[in-house]
Every structure is written in C-alpha cells, then in structure tokens.
Amino acid sequence: MTESKTGVKKRLPLEGITVLDFSRVLSGPYCTMVLADLGARVIKIERVGTGDDTRAWGPFVDDESAYFMCFNRGKESIALDFKSPRDRALLDRLLDKSDVLVENFRPGVMDRLGYGAEQLARTHPHLVYASISGFGHSGPFKDLPGYDMVVQAMGGVMSLTGWPDQPPARVGTSFGDLGASLFAVIGILAGLYKRSRDAQGTHVDIAMLDCQAALMETAFARLDVEAKVPKRTGDAHPSLAPFESFAAQDGRVVIAAGNDQLFLLMADAIGVPELALDPRFLSNDLRVQNRPALTDAIERITRTAPIDVWLGKLTGAGVPCAPINTIDKVLEHPQLLSRNMFIHVQGESERKVKTAGSPIKMSTSPDEDVTIVRKSPAVDQHREAILRELMAASGAYASQADDGSDDDKLKRSASLAA
Amino acid sequence: MTESKTGVKKRLPLEGITVLDFSRVLSGPYCTMVLADLGARVIKIERVGTGDDTRAWGPFVDDESAYFMCFNRGKESIALDFKSPRDRALLDRLLDKSDVLVENFRPGVMDRLGYGAEQLARTHPHLVYASISGFGHSGPFKDLPGYDMVVQAMGGVMSLTGWPDQPPARVGTSFGDLGASLFAVIGILAGLYKRSRDAQGTHVDIAMLDCQAALMETAFARLDVEAKVPKRTGDAHPSLAPFESFAAQDGRVVIAAGNDQLFLLMADAIGVPELALDPRFLSNDLRVQNRPALTDAIERITRTAPIDVWLGKLTGAGVPCAPINTIDKVLEHPQLLSRNMFIHVQGESERKVKTAGSPIKMSTSPDEDVTIVRKSPAVDQHREAILRELMAASGAYASQADDGSDDDKLKRSASLAA
C-alpha cells in the first residue's frame, strides 16, 4: 500500500486474497500471475523435487528457467507430497485460509488426490475453485490431453491465420493457453464478487477449446449468414479495406483506413486524392470486393518511399498506420516505456530478465515501480514461513480445535522443515 | 435465476450490476458482452440516428448487421443527444444507479462531453469507470488512433505470426481488440471486488498496445537472455518439438509431443519406435535444434496415410494431436456442442444467427439454455422503459430531491418519448 499525492491510500484491488495454485506450465500460472499482479497472495503447490514443468524450459540464465520466472514472479512456493499425512494436514489448513484455488490438471486428477471441486465444495464451501483444462470437465473429449497447439488447430484460429497460398500458421504466441487464462481470471473475479454478496464459493470450469470458439469474433456468424467457410487472408481484415500492410521501399507498412472518411484522408496523405473518387473504391464494400486493384493502386505509390515517410504523412493526417515491429523494437517502444510496461523478473541467480508487466492500470492502484525486481520462488522456498504462519494462527484459535491432531501434525512438520 | 435439482438457487454472478456502455465497434462491446453474459444489465448509450458503427458492418441479414448482433446480444439501447439538457439530466440519473461505465473513445472525448473519469470520480465516486483505447490515457502516443491492425503490427505479434519466408500475417481474429476487452473485464471485476470492500470506485485505463505486450509470452525474455530477435516459425512452437503440423496423405495433422515421454509414445504410435532412440532426437532441446531432420523423419511416415488414421493412433496412445479444423468443422464439433458453446442471436428480423456463447461455466450459474435466442437492441429501443423506470424510482425518493428540476426535465423527456 502506498500513499498518493492527495493523501488517499492506494492499494491493489486483490490485497488480502489468498490463491492456492496447483497449476503448472502456462495456462494456470499466467492466470495466477494476473491475480498476483492485482495484489493477491499466490502460493504455488509444487511437486516435490522438480516442481513446475517449466522450470526445465528455456531460455535459461545460469541454469535457471527464464520461462518460469516470467509467469511465476511474486509467488510463494511450497512442495507437497500428497501421500504424506503431514503434508495433507498442512494443505487442509491452507485451504481453510485461502479464497481461491486454481488447477489445470486433466479432469479427475484433483478428485483422485482428494481435492476435487465437489469434495471441496462440501468441506470448503467458501472457495472459488477454478479448473482450466483442454476440453473442460464435461463432454466426450473431457479426458483427452489439450495443449495450446491442439486447441489452436481444433478451434479454428489456425485455419484463419497465415497466407491463403501457404499452410495455416499458428498465432505467434500461445493464444490457446492465454485465452483460457484470461477467461479463468474473469470467472474467478466474478466468483469472488458473487461471494462478497452471498458468502458462497463456486466451481469455474474453463476449457481451452471453448475459449478458442469464444474468441473467433464473427467467423461463425459469417459462415451461418453467407454459407461460405471463412478463410485466412494473410494480413488483411476479412471485411475492411484498406486494413492491411502495403509494400514500401524498405519493408511493409500497415494502413488501417476502414471507413470512407479515413480512406479519403489516406488518399490525400499519400498524394493521390483521385483514388477516393475511383468508382471501384467508393465504399468499404466496394474496396473489399476490389482489393487486388486497391492494393496495386496504393503500392504503386507506397513503393516509392520508405516506411518512415509514409508513417509521418499518414499520422499527420490522422490515418491509423503502423510499422510491423519486431520484438526488439517493441521492447524499446516509447509508449510502452512511458506506460511502465516492462519489468524485471529474477530467480535465485543475480541475472535479471525483462518481461512485460501488467496492462491493468487502475487509478486506485500504486503506480507500477519498474525499478522493483519481481522474484520467482525456488521449489519449496516458503515452506518454513508458511508453517510458522499456520502455527501462529493455530495458536490463536487453539481453544477452538476439536481434537488437536492436525496441530500436532503441523508441529512435527514444522520441526522437520526447520 | 433458476433452481437446480438440489434446490439451491442458481444465479449469474453479476445479477444486479448495471453497466452504462458508451462504447462502439468491438473492444468495448465485446467487454460489455462478457459482463452481460455474466448477468450484468448493460445499457448501451448510442449516437442518435445511426447508433453503433458496426450496425453498418456486414454480414447482413435482412439489412441488419449480424456483426452487431453477435456482440450486443442481451443489451438495452438508449440514444442520447449530449447537447440536450433533457438527455443530460436523464444520463445523470442513469449514472446514479449504475455500477460500471465503459467507453472506448480516444482520450479526451469523454472529458469534453463532461463525463470524463476525473469529473465522474467527484460526482459519482462509486463508479468503476473503464476506458479502452489504442494507447491508453498517458504517454506520447495517447492521442493517436489505435485499431486492431495497428496494435497487432506495432505490438509484435505480427512479426511472430506466419511462415518465415512470407510476409508477417495477422492473427486470424481481432486479437488486438479482444485482448484489450478481456483485460478490461478483469480490471472492471477487480474494481467491483475492491468496491465491495472499500465502497470506492476506480478508473481502469486499458491500452490495446499494453495488452499486446502482456500477451507476448516469453518473447521479450528470449530476446533479453539470448540476444536474438524472436522470429515467426510458421506453425511450430519456438521451443518445443514436435509441436506443429505434419503432412499426411490428405492434409496436415498437428502433433504436440513436447516432452520425452510423449515423444516416445508418438514414435511408438506411428510405428517407428527407433525414432526415440535416434541421437538427434533424444531430448526436446536436441529435437528443436534438429527440427528439419525431425520433420523429414516424421513426414516420411505420416504422408503414407490420411489424417484420421493418425488421429486414431495418436489419440489411442495418449499423444496430443488435432486436425486443423476449418470454421464449419468447429461449428459442428461434438465437444463444443456438448458444452453448449453455440447460441443464437437475433435483431429485429426473424432470422437467427449462430455465434459462440460464454466459455465461463460456473457451477453456481444456471446451465446455458441454447434454445433461448439472445436479442440485440434497435437504436434507442429501451428509452421509454428506462424513462418509466427512472420516473418510478424518482417518485419513490421525490421527497429527497433537492430542487426537483431534474425530475421536471425527466417528465418532459418521458412525454416526448411516449
């Protein structure tokens, strides 16, 4: 919590919320990363020894995974052996004091461990319990493994991505995982809000494939209405023109002039006002129909000068345009820098790694301080601290304990960890 | 609200929440669509006459936009003239009884209308006020127009999407808009949760470009650690292999066997167990380094039989795999159908249009009833009903009104609308 100039306390919206995070790899950890960035305390429950799979994924700095650091910044870690009664007692205590549980195992795994959604709904009805899986907890595909690549292919986005005369391409980021992560965060927050009113938890069942369908924009409606299967269009918007990249002297430049007024401004800005009077280009619909002729007419001009010249002219005229930035250009983009969008993460080694921070800027949250390095945990790093905390809490309500057996187990566990 | 078999009342988590929606086109309307799907009441504030821009966007059914129907299902509409004192009085009343405001104008527009975030923070401090814009409300780019295509190009995803020997491709859905929509929903729900604890609203400032950076996965970390600019890889995952599509007899099949155990299972399933013993393919790192040789070795086999044969063998062996579905196949996918992921939307005409429903399945929400058609509103369709409702509420607290002038304006407005 920090104090703003006006003296009003600024705090992150999820301060005080505890998330027990059973998830691994990407879809779950990205979800709990967003929750941590919003102020929640996230405790990772890891496999004893190796921990999260991505601890073995590159790129590496001093043998540590930068992949892991990016998505596990600011979290705590405790490694639990689900066959150990001591560890199960500890987990029961953690469940008592947690608000949210996140897991991304295949359906059935958490049930077999004894921590399935229906089981915990009876013992811990206050929990907002979120499951992320490839296909969800119902339906004929529920037991199949779902990975990013699988749902990108199965859900349709690959069929729409890439150039028409080439094989389908993958979205250049793990759209299958991250789409599910964001819908899971939304389900969790909606569940917490609901709980603030009715004091009851819920089970949020997110399927990566469902999320792919939800993100297909108007593709299904276009098929239903036009009876034509939508196809990939390279870099052109299927129903707006010009809304794509054009060849310049030194590369390609994006021009997004999807309505008549912007098209007029564009034609003027690149020095061919007569383009806007051409009967083939009088409306967006006509421009979409005559896209090859439009591309020719525009590129005849744009090929004559470099990208920067066109960006200057178009921006000056108020026409949306852009260079196609490579990642190095994005990392030094003045707008992203001014929005504090890059932060440093770090594991156990000295080396800090750059990654993107939170895009959720709230007037009531403290400003992002990009000089603070976000640490990711070593496997089981916080066992001792968590045990001590639980013991202290347990002491505080010892008189309420029904038989003390859990306390005894906890104490043994603590002396073992110390 | 419906009753479940066990007698527990099921209700959507945002029932009772009112959202005033000043947004148009896609990023804002998709955000408020998610809120409506979660049970919020969404009142669209539209431009008098033409309303939301997308009402003029195809595909059309009986001259009505199916594009508009998809993202505005279940919302109400009132058209307001911001120059009319009557309409401003009405809007003030609506603001009093709303919880959330969403707008996606360029920074400054809402301020000039008199409804900027700072202004409303004084008069309506309870409001969770969300702004979505291309570049956000701060920084050197804040006044520039930001469209999906612009931020896809500027934010780096295009540089990573497509085949290496072809120009960058766009993500086959409006990833720039939808990414921002989802982060906006998260900010709004976090704000509502915060408000449930401290009774204060907030301003959520979402920039499409920030969201692009946040969704670039490990691209920045890879650049920082390896000092190589990440490049597009067609359909291959940059750091997992095999995790891409392979040529079969009748098309391409995706195989996602990104760890040693899955690779072993895959080699067995396609009938070449010796592949797993090949020194070039012993670990994921080696397989990524020797990807061309790996592709050759796998395709030598997969080319000999059709996609379905490989899907059968691989699925049987527990290896993640998938066909690259076109949109018609997605629309009839048995898993999505069993998850009730397709719904019908409708405008004023008889014709219903298929689109994707909500992927947020909660145990405490009523099951999605796909037989219910979700209606989108005509421009200003709900003016009369809203006025009547405000009048009724105003009657209920008439004695508290300080001077009655707003009420008088409302009454004149109501008689005009009737």
Image (spheres, coloured by chain):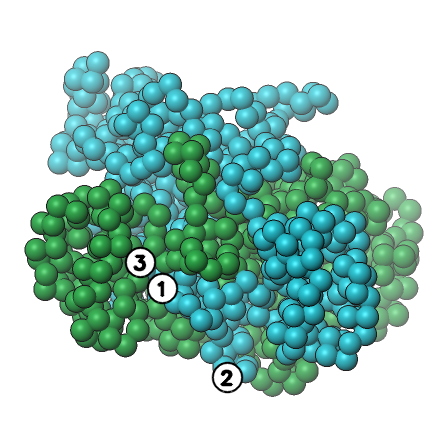
Chain colours: A cyan, B green
Cα distance between the residues tagged 1 and 2: 22 Å
Query: Pointer 3: what residue?
Result: B244
Vertical position of residue A314 compared to residue A344: above or below: below
Q: Position of residue A124 (x, y in %)?
A: 32, 41
- Residue depicted at 48% across the width and 46% down the height: B215
The quarter of the picture where residue B24 lies is bottom right
Q: Quadrant of the C terminus of chain A?
A: top left
Nearer the observer, disc 3 or disc 2? 3
Q: Tag 3: Cα neighbours inside 10 Å, few (<14), some, or many (≥20)? A: many
How many numbered badges does the structure rendering display?
3
Dot 1 corresponds to which residue?
A153
| Chain ID at mark 2 | A
Which residue occupies the foreground of this view, B296 or A38? B296
Q: Which residue is mark 2?
A: A227
Marks 1/3: CA–CA distance: 9 Å
The amino acid sitting under disc 3 is: Glu
Q: Examine the image and state in which quarter residue A90 appears.
A: top left
Identify the amino acid type marked 2.
Ala
**Residue B262 as seen in the image, left or right of residue B142:** left
Which residue is depicted at the point 74% across and 71% down? B379
| SS assignment at label 2 | loop
Q: Mark 2 or mark 1, which is nearer the start of the sequence?
A: 1
Dot 1 and dot 3 within a common chain: no
Q: Which marked residue is nearer to the observer: mark 1 or mark 3?
A: 3
Q: Position of residue B248 (x, y in %)?
A: 25, 71
